[in-house]
Image (cartoon, grey):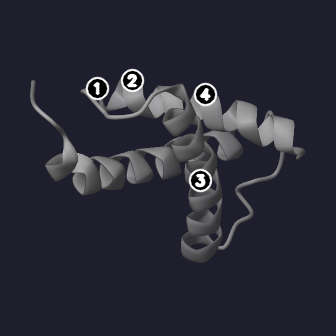
């Protein structure tokens, strides 16, 4: 898959992760996209390590999207834990 496909999958996986874990997060669409792209890579790596399958096959494969969303959820939770103490209250 090309870089444009990874950015698109990352954007959508990040948005889906935020929908599944609602709440206020510092950062906007760029942070969401970066979390989604990194989450897709993390999900694909975890799928290969844990299950021994290549879960990043193609843009329209369900396994690619599941891996990207699960990886994005993991990274979103970690991001929230790391930025919890850095939020400023008004």
Q: Is residue 50 above or below residue 71?
A: below
In the rendered image, residue 69, in percent from the top left (x then y), is placed at 53, 41
**Residue identified by numbered label 1:** 22
Is 52 drawn above or below residue 31 in the view shown?
Answer: below
Q: Which mark is residue 46?
A: none
Q: Mark 1 or mark 4, which has the lower sequence index?
A: 4
Q: Secondary structure at mark 1?
A: loop
User: First in sequence: mark 2 or mark 3?
Assistant: 2
**Residue 8, quarter of the rendered image:** top right
Q: Secondary structure at mark 3?
A: helix
Q: Nearer the viewer, residue 42 or 58?
A: 42
Seen at 9% across and 24% down, the residue is 90
Nearer-N-terminus badge (4/3): 4
- Whether tag 2 and tag 4 are in contact, CB under 8 A, the answer is no
> Could you tell me which residue is drawn at 24 percent across and 27 percent down?
23
Q: Residues within 10 Å of mark 4 (few under 14, many from 20)?
A: many
| Residue at mark 2 to residue at mark 3: CA–CA distance | 17 Å
Image coords of residue 71 (percent x, y): 51, 52
- Is disc 4 placed on a helix, strand or loop? helix
Q: Which mark is residue 12?
A: 4
Q: What is the secondary structure assignment of the residue under circle 2? A: helix
Which residue was labeled with disc 3? 38
Question: Outermost residue toward the left?
Answer: 90
Read off the residue under disc 2: 19
Is residue 51 depicted above or below 24 in this figure?
below
Cα separation between marks 1 and 4: 15 Å
Task: Report the front residue among 64 and 72.
Answer: 72
Query: Foreground mark, 2 or 3?
Result: 3
10 Å crowding of disc 3: few (<14), some (14-19), many (20+): many
Relative to 13, is 24 on the left or the right?
left
Give the mark, 3 or 1, whose residue is nearer the N terminus: 1
User: Pointer 3 and pointer 1: residues touching (CB < 8 Å)?
Assistant: no
């Amino acid at each position: 898959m090309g870089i444009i496909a990874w950015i698109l999958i990352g954007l959508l996986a990040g948005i889906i992760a935020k929908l599944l874990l609602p709440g206020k997060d510092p950062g906007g669409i760029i942070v969401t996209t970066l979390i989604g792209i990194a989450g897709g890579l993390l999900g694909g790596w975890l799928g290969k390590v844990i299950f021994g399958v290549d879960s990043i096959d193609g843009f329209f494969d369900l396994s690619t999207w599941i891996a990207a969303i699960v990886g994005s959820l993991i990274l979103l939770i970690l991001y929230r834990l790391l930025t919890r103490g850095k939020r400023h209250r008004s």
